Amino acid sequence: MEEQFKNSMATQYRAVFPELLNATGTLFGGHALKWMDEAAYITATRFTRDRMFTVTIEKLKFLKAIHPDTIVEIISKVEKVEKVRLYVKVELYAEEMYGPGREKAIEGLFVFASLDEKYKPHQLKGRQKADLKH
């Protein structure tokens, strides 16, 4: 099971260019959330090998504004597994593109469920124990 947690982790990188900025000149939060949800989805799918759907985002914290000419790194990993729900922790780090410095800018817990053909939740595939934590 430990290997399953490790193999499902995902890391992505994005560059923040002017077309991604909001009215204050920093990264638009919607873009960041999209990237984080994509990374979480990849992690959830790799972990379960099932069709996963985002149910909610918990404990979302915007810790630092992200400026242009920044590289962001998005790291997602399975935090907890329940009968029907999977919890994926996602952290977004901001790194200066042309200088030193890297800080956590956003973090959140993305909750996923697997749905059947009628869009009803069903037990996760390959789940061995309820309430697994990593």
Image (spheres, rainbow, N blue to C red):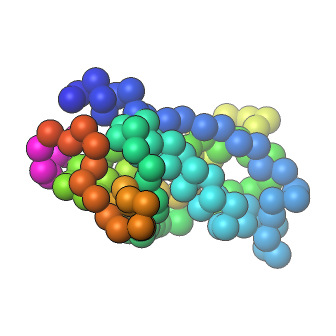
Q: Which residues are magenta?
A: 129-134
Quarter of the figure with the N terminus: top left
- Left-right relation of 18 to 133: right
**Which residue is most to the bottom?**
23
- The one nearer the camera, 101 or 39, is 39
In the displayed structure image, the side of residue 62 where residue 101 appears, left or right: right
Residue 96 locus on image (x, y percent):
71, 41
Asked if the stretch drawn in magenta spans residue 8, the answer is no
Farthest front residue? 117
Q: Is residue 96 visible?
A: no
Q: Nearer the viewer, residue 68 or 118?
A: 118
Along the viewing direction, whichever of 9 and 18 lies nearer the viewer? 9
Q: Residue at x 76, y 43 (%)?
A: 15
Which residue is more in the foreground, 65 or 124? 124
| Residue shown at the point (88%, 57%) measured from the top left | 18
* x, y percent for residue 81: 23, 49
